[in-house]
Amino acid sequence: MPLLALAIWANRAERRWLWLLSLLLLMGCRDGLGLIVVGLTLEQA
């Protein structure tokens, strides 16, 4: 969950490299977080 908060903060602070890194790390943590990461990516796109 801290990585999810970091991803949201990094996106709002316009730090794209940190946002992408946190999303990639989230994808590897749990299978359920993969859906959240896809949702965040679609929202920001």
Image (cartoon, grey):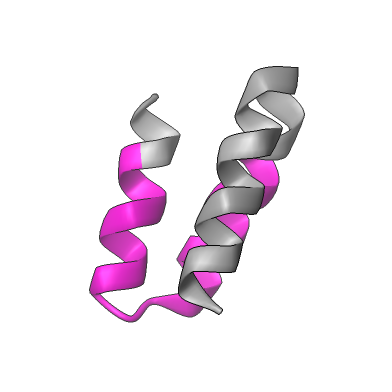
- Residue 13 as seen in the image, left or right of residue 28: left
- Residue 31 as seen in the image, left or right of residue 37: right
Residue 28: quadrant of the picture: top right
> What number of labels is visible?
0
Locate residue 45, reporting x and y percent: 56, 79
In the image, which residues are magenta? Answer: 5-26
Locate residue 37, reporting x and y percent: 60, 46
Q: Residue at x 31, y 41 (%)?
A: 5
Q: Can residue 28 be seen in the rendering of this structure?
A: yes
Residue 4: quadrant of the picture: top left
Locate residue 40, reporting x and y percent: 51, 55
Q: Residue at x 25, y 71 (%)?
A: 12
The one of 33 and 19 positioned closer to us in this rendering: 33
Q: Is residue 6 above or below residue 1?
A: below
Q: Can residue 30 be seen in the rendering of this structure?
A: no
Taken as a whole, is the magenta stretch helix, strand or loop? helix
Residue 33 on the magenta span: no
Residue 11 on the magenta span: yes
- Residue 24 as seen in the image, left or right of residue 5: right
Locate residue 24, reporting x and y percent: 69, 49
Q: Residue at x 54, y 73 (%)?
A: 17
Q: Quadrant of the N terminus?
A: top left
Q: Is residue 10 above or below residue 28?
A: below
